[in-house]
Amino acid sequence: MTINLSDIELDRLYPAYLRVGIDNRILSVGPSIARLLGAEIIGQDVFEAFEFKRPSRLTTIAAIGHTRQELLIKSNQDPDVLLRGIGLVRDDQVLLLVGHVIGGQDEAFASTLNFSDFSPTDSTLDLLLVRELNQNLLSEAQAISEELDEKRLAAESASKAKSDFLATVSHEIRTPLNGVLGMANYLWETKLNPEQENALRILKDSGEGLLSLLNEVLDLSKIEAGKTELRNEDFELADLVHGAADLFEMKAREQGLYCSVSTAEGRFHGDAGRLRQVLSNLVFNAIKFTQSGGVSIQVTVEQEHDPALRLIKFVVTDTGIGMDQSTLDGLFDAFYQGDASVTRRFGGTGLGLAISRQLAEMMGGDISAASVVGEGATFTFYVRLPLLPNQVPEERTADISLRAVDVSALKILAAEDNKTNQFVLRNYLERFDLEVTIAENGHDVVRLWRDGNYDLILMDIRMPGMGGEEATELIRSYEVTEQRQRTPIIALTANMMREQVDEYERVGMDEAMAKPMDIGALENVLRRVASGGFYSPSVSDG
Amino acid sequence: MYGMIHQAARRMVLEIAGEDDWSAIVSKSGLSERHFVSGLSFDDETTFALIGAIQEHTKIPLDELLKSFGEYWIKYASETSYGGMMKMAGNDLVSLLSNLDRMHVGIAAQMPGASMPSFEVLDASDTQIKIRYRSERDGLEAFVVGLLQGLLNRFNDFGEIRYVINADFSDFTIDRSVEKVPA
C-alpha cells in the first residue's frame, strides 16, 4: 500500500521535516524548521546547514538510501536544533522525516519550542512537559528545604536561648538553695525539740525536692534539645548494678522491704553514669510505691546480630500498688504521674521516667512497663552496648575500705566567694574534724596553693577577678614547671550542665560536685583523696 | 486534586484577603502544610473542603468564587513556574485552547492518577469560539468560565462567555465580537 501525503499533511505529521534534492540543496522544510531557522535555509547545502552526527561519513544525501542507521543532525546555526529520524529516497529527492530531540541544548532553546513543533505521534513533547514539571517540583523542594532550614535555625536559636536561660536560672537558684540546705543540715545536728525537728524535716525535704526538680527539668530540657551527649567509658556491669542497688538498700530495709539483685557480668563501653541514672530511677520508684514485699533487680546480657554488641536488659520488679492501663499509657510522658492522689501521696516531679525513656532510646534501647493494680509492676529497659574483651577483674573492695580511711589529716583549700556557702563548707568539713583555708577568688587560690601544701582544692567556678577555671589552668601549669605533685581539684559549682562539666575537666579539674553540696559526695571525695584514690596525697607520705 | 491547586487558592486568598483570613480559612478546612506541596495528590473532598472554607469565610457566592478562582488559576500558572508550559502551549487563544488536552496528557504522565478535564475546540472564527468541555467532576462550569476569562485576559482578548450543560459534556461559547468597555 502506498500512501501519498500532501504538503499540509506532511506539515502536520512531521513539522520539522526537510526535503533535499540529490544535489544536496534543501528544497523545502516543515513549519517548525522554518520558524526556528528561518526560510533562508531553503536553497542551502544540507551539509553546510547541518552537521550529520549519524551517519557521520555521509558525503551525499542520496547515499542515505544505503544506510539503515537512524539519522541524527544538528543545525550549524543558532539555535541548536537537534533532529532525529529517518531519510527516505524518493526519485530525485530525499525526505528527512525528523523530529526534535531534547537534550544537550541549553534551557533557552527548550523555551523556544512550542507544541506545534512536535508531531502528534511524538511523545518528546510529553518528556519536555515532564522536565518542566520536574524543574517546578525541584524548585519547590528547594524552597521547602530552605524554609525548613530557617525554621530549624530558629528552633535551634530558641533552644539555645532556653538552655542559656535554664543554665542561668539553675545557677541563681542553686546558690541560695545551697545556703538553705546547708543551714538546714547544720541545724539538724543541733539539739531540737520534736516540733522544731518536724519543721526542719519539712524544710529539708522541700529543699531537696526543689533541687531534684531543678536537676530533672534541666536534664530533660537538655535531652530534648539534643544537647545531651553520651559519655564513652569502660565499666563493669555488675559493679554498676550493685552500686545502684546499694544506694537504695538501706531505704528498702527501713521500709521493711527486701531488695534482691541478680546480674550478669562483663565489661562494657558506654555511659555508665546515664545507665546508673535510669536504673536508680526505676529502683527508687519501685521502693517508693511498695509497702510490703520488696524489689528485685535482674540484669541479663543477650547476644546481638552484631557480634561486637550486646543487649543488656534491666528488669526491676516490685510488689507495690501497681497501675491500671490508663496510668501505664502515659507513664513515660513528661510530668505524668498517674492520678493526682498518687502525686499528693508519693510526691515526685513526674520527669524521671520521661528522662529514662529518652536516655534508653539514646543508647539504642527502649523502656516499657507492665503492671496489674495491687500486684506490683515490672519495668524493663534495655540498651545496646559494645562488650569489651575479658580482663582480669579489678579489686572491688575500694568502696568498702574507704569507710575506714581517716581523713582528719587532710589539708583543704577551698575557693568560695559567697559567705553563706563558706559557712556551709566549713560546717561540713568540721564534721570530719577538718579545717579549711578559704580563698575568695582565683588569685588567692593560686597564691595560697603555691605557699601551702594542700591535699585537695575545692574550687568554685564563678568568682570575682579570676574564676575557678583560670585558676586551675594556672595551678596545672605551675605543677609542670615547678615539678610539683598534682593536687586533686574538685569543681564545686551550681553550673553542672554536661558541657560545663566537660569544660572543667578540660582545664584540669578532676571532678565536679554540684551545689547544693551533698555531704555524702563530699565524704566520698575526702576518703578517696586520703586513700590515694586520686593521686598520692601528702598525708599518706607521712 | 493536586497540591498545586491548593497553592493557587492560598495565593489568591492571600492577595485578596490577607494572612489573618487565610489562617482562619486553612484552620477551618482542616488542611495542613503537606496539602500545599504541588506534586502530591489528594482526594477531591480535600480540595472541596478548602473551597468550602474560603466560601464560608468570604461569603462570596460559590459560582462567583469558582469563576474568580478559575480566572486566578490562569494568572497563577502564567506567573509561576508553570509559565513556560503555558507559553509552549500557544501564542493565541485558539492555539492554546487546542493544545490544552495535549498539555494535560504531558502533565498526567508526571502526575499519575490526575483526572484532567478535556477541552475540544469545535469551531473557531474571528467572532466566535465553540469549546466542548468534559470532566469527571460535576458542577465546575463556573470554574471553566473563569479559566476561559483568564485566557482571554492573557491574550488581551475580549469576549462574552456562555455555556450549556449537557449530560456528558458542556458546550461553551466565546463571542469575541463583544468588546470590553474600557473602565
Image (spheres, coloured by chain):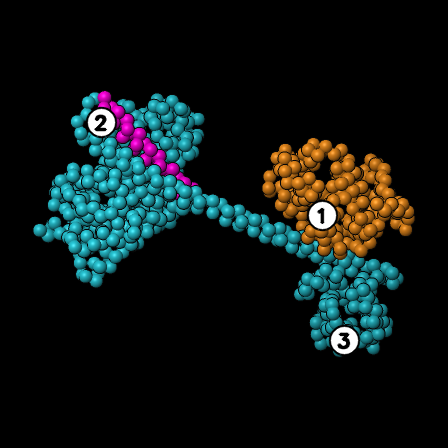
Residue A110 in sight here = yes
Disc sitting over residue A47 in the figure: 3
Q: Label 1 sits on what residue type?
A: Tyr
- Which class describes the residues within 10 Å of circle 3: few (<14), some (14-19), or many (20+)? some
Nearest the viewer among A507 and B106 is: A507
Q: Position of residue A535 (x, y in %)?
A: 18, 52
Residue A219 falls in image quadrant: top left
* Image side of residue A190 versus residue A154, left or right: left
Residue A24 falls in image quadrant: bottom right
Q: Position of residue A193 (x, y in %)?
A: 19, 22
Q: Position of residue A344 (x, y in %)?
A: 36, 24
Nearest the viewer among A450 and A102 is: A450
Q: Is residue A210 magenta?
A: yes
Q: Which chain is orange?
A: B
What predominant SS class does the magenta segment belong to?
A: helix
Kindly identify which residue carries mark 2. A254
Disc sitting over residue A516 in the figure: none
